[in-house]
Image (spheres, helix red, strand yellow):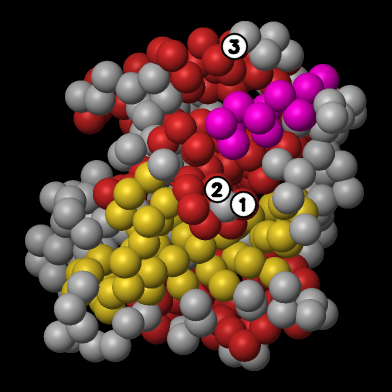
Amino acid sequence: MKKIILDCDPGHDDAMAILLAHGNPEIELVAITTVAGNQTLDKTSLNARRVATVAGIQDVPVAAGCDRPLTRELKTAGYIHGESGLDGPAFGEPTVPLDSRHAVDLIIELLMHSNGDITLVPTGPLTNIAMAVRKEPRIVAKVKEIILMGGAYTRGNTTPAAEFNIYVDPEAAEIVFRAGWPLTMVGLDLTHQALATPAVLERIAALGTPVARIAVQLMEFFRQTYRRNAGFDSPPVHDPCAVARVIDPNVMQCVNAFVAIETRGEYSSGMTVTDFSSRLGPTNAQVATKLDVDLFWDLMVDAIRRIGAPGVRAS
Ligand code: PIR
Ligand code: CA
């Protein structure tokens, strides 16, 4: 089993990442931690509990973390994810509780008590992860690796230079990219290949389960806002790509690079400056370049199929 901590800000694609992590038989989800990003922390935490409830996730702690970036004001993405952060489906009152521990403390506790077999999968701003490294630097040696959704080497989605997760908290990203652990950057260059096309949504809808219906409703809402805001015909489903890399490294090609985080640029704050020829520094990241689109969607559809009706695990 591959153990992961999913640090997220649900978020439509974060919700899909939760479903992939829970439904895939090779992943053991040891915690879901939440951070402010797509929406405020209260909303992303409620949304994580909503998704955990509809997916029948039990005995996995859901813990809330930082409610704002390290030094900056929070900027959210309601224009993409709606007022709730997870607009589209109607969710009932979640039954999965919020853990009483702070996400930063839970991350440290789980890593320090592990055998070095836990992978961190951040899919939101890197505030919690940076805080954890500052509070307990020994987690750097304890973690197996960190596979994050964030950044881009060609163009941003929030400014011309910056991807949202890095743009929101560049100071945190700088700490995480400089920490010295094995790190994979699954950025927009990769995730813009993971498009929830009508054909993909038909495959999910055909599963006929409540979770499949909710996934389709989420993707339909995402399609509308992505069309309106970014001119995409089909929305890119960023966050599960990072989870897919844990399940099967062959799902994407990566190239080693030195990645620096721009924190001071007048026009480029939050940019992941990606040097594939190590002129600026030694390799600190594997940078994802090409997705095996069919394998990715097979993993996603299979995970939703296995979740089935909550509590009933298909074989
Ligand atoms: C997606 C996100 C934020 C803004 C836009 N425009 C689109 C969220 C996703 O949840 C993903 O983790 C990352 N941030 C992509 O930039
Ligand atoms: Ca996210």
At 49% from the left and 53% from the top, the residue drawn is 250
Q: Are marks 3 and 1 in contact (CB under 8 Å)?
A: no
In x, y percent, where is residue 158?
24, 46
Q: Secondary structure at mark 2?
A: helix
Q: Are marks 1 and 2 in contact (CB under 8 Å)?
A: yes
Q: Which residue, given by chain and number where applicable, does mark 3 sit on?
A: 205
At 73% from the left and 50% from the top, the residue drawn is 26
Dividing the picture into quadrants, the one containing residue 263 is: bottom left
**Which residues are drawn in magenta?**
298-309
- Left/right of residue 144 with respect to residue 297 in the rendered view: right
Near mark 1 (Cα within 10 A), the count class, few <14, some 14-19 or many ≥20, is: some
In x, y percent, where is residue 35?
56, 55
Question: Mark 2 to mark 3: distance in Å?
Answer: 21 Å
Which of marks 3 and 2 precedes in the sequence? Answer: 3
Dividing the picture into quadrants, the one containing residue 233 is: top left
Q: Which residue, given by chain and number where applicable, does mark 1 sit on?
A: 247
Residue type indicated by callout 2 = Ala
